[in-house]
Every structure is written in structure tokens, then in C-alpha cells.
Image (cartoon, rainbow, N blue to C red):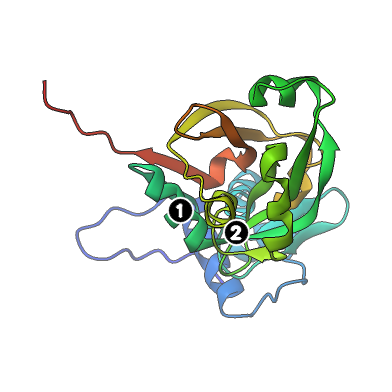
Amino acid sequence: MAPRDTPPAGRPKAPLYQRIETQLREAIAEGRYPVGSLLPTEAELCERLRVSRHTVREALRRLKDAGLVERRQGAGTLVIAREPDRVFVQTVRDISGLFQFAADTVLVLDSVQPSPLSEEEAAACGARTGERWLRCQGVRRTREGRPIGPVTALVAPRFAAVSALLPETLTAPIYSYIEKRFGVPVAEVVQEISAGLLPAAVAPLFGKKGRPVGMRFVRRYLDAAGEVMLVSFNWHLAERFTYVTRLRRGEA
């Protein structure tokens, strides 16, 4: 394997590290380096490709950022996927957009049980610290099984009986089960988005070490009287999630 030196006519050469990255991507995609195997060492790649270690390291860094490999000190470069991570894009124009997001993904619940609210949770819910709300915890995933992020949904006590309707894997939002069971529609959603370091317990879900940058979504679902029905807390890995909001100007 040697870097390809002849670009298409009229096009400039890509940087050397990019050409090496492309060849390694192709080799991984074709199964020449199967998932679970190790790539050649930096020294072997340098000798084989006749390039500097800096060039090889940059190519490997880009493969790591794409989610194809994992680099371990003293253990080499491990192939962990044949295809690069996809950035998940959520587009929302109104409340129905949240329903579509849930329909395009799945929420796999780990637990559903009454639980006392922490101080932070109580503030978001407009309730008292220690008050028991129905706590639904799980991981939202793409249809292919890729993790989008962990979810904690807190359901107001008056709707706690909805727990009997929730399957282990949800393809519709929790609030739709509340609407169906109690006949109380969601009239408004208040959403807060903030950036910060992912909680230590969340990073491994995305195959990350340490605490990479994340996006935190807190959504409060209100009925027509402005009472809180449900509050959800969601974390996403910033580099893999894009949130798009389309706003149209109303008539003056």
C-alpha cells in the first residue's frame, strides 16, 4: 500500500495524511482490517508508506475522530467500526417535530419506577425536592442501534399510572402515552439547551474516555393550564448531534 500520487485531472493533490487516511478507510471498509483487529503500527506504516510519523499520526487521528478506530497506549490502533460515525440531525418546527424525532428513533427503557426528585430536578419540575415522580430512564438510539444519548423522563404523579402502558422499547414519545391514557394533550413545550462536559457515566456510551463536550436538552411539557406534565433530560455527544430549528416570521 502506497499513497496514490495521481489526482484526477485538474484537481490539486490532497494532503498526504488525507490520502493515507482514505486508503486506510477503504481497507477497513473492505474488511482487510476487520473490526477487532489492529492496524499496522506507526513505525510499520511509516516504513511501508515512506512518510513521516507526524503524517501517519494525523491520518490515524482522523480515523479515530471518525469513530473507526480506538488508539490505546501500548496496545496499538484497534479497528472498532467499518463505517464512520454519522452525525444525527434533529429538525424541529413545532411539537409534532418532537413526535417525528421519537418515531425515527427508539427509546430503550432500563427502568420505570417512582423516585424522589433531586434539588435540580425539582426546580425543573416546579415541585418539591424529594417529591416522588415516575422516573423513566433509558437510552435513545437510531433504528440501526447507534446511541443518540441517555434519557431521563420525569412524569408528574397525576400521570404515574402511564407506567403500565410503556413498553420496554418505545417508538413514540412518552407524552403520547399520557395523552392517550388521560386525554390531556400537551399544549406547550419549553426547551433549554446548554453545553458542557458529558457526565463521567455517559461518555462510555459513545465509546469515549474522559469527559468530552456534550449538549444537554431539558424539555418541560405543559398542559393547557400551564401545569407540568413531564420533564425530560437528554445528553448528546456534541460532535455527533446537530439540532436544527426553523422559525417563520408571523404576521405583524
Judged by depth in the image, the label closer to the viewer, 2 or 1, is 1
For marks 2 and 1, give the CA distance. 53 Å
Q: Position of residue 251 (x, y in %)?
A: 11, 26
**Left or right position of 129 against 18:** right
Q: Position of residue 174 (x, y in %)?
A: 60, 52
**Left or right position of 175 against 44:** left
**Left or right position of 182 against 164:** left
Residue beneath label 1, please?
Answer: 99
Instruction: State which quarter of the image contains the C terminus.
Output: top left
Q: Is mark 2 on a helix, strand or loop?
A: loop
Q: Which residue lies furthest to the right in this view?
A: 74
Q: Mark 2, residues whose alpha carbon is within 10 Å: few (<14), some, or many (≥20)?
A: few
Instruction: State which quarter of the image contains the N terminus.
Output: bottom right
Q: Nearer the viewer, residue 78 or 91?
A: 91
Q: Position of residue 85 (x, y in %)?
A: 56, 58
Q: Nearer the viewer, residue 161 or 30?
A: 161
Q: Mark 1, residues whose alpha carbon is within 10 Å: few (<14), some, or many (≥20)?
A: some
Residue 158: assigned label: none
Q: Which residue lies furthest to the bottom in this view?
A: 31
Residue beneath label 2, please?
Answer: 50
Residue located 71% across and 34% down the image = 198
Kind of residue indicated by mark 1: Phe
Please identify the quarter of the rendering in which residue 68 is found: bottom right
Kind of residue indicated by mark 2: Arg
CB of mark 2 within 8 Å of CB of mark 1? no
| First of labels 2, 1 by sequence position | 2
Please tell me whether residue 176 is drawn above or below residue 28 in the rendered image: above
Residue located 28% across and 53% down the image = 12
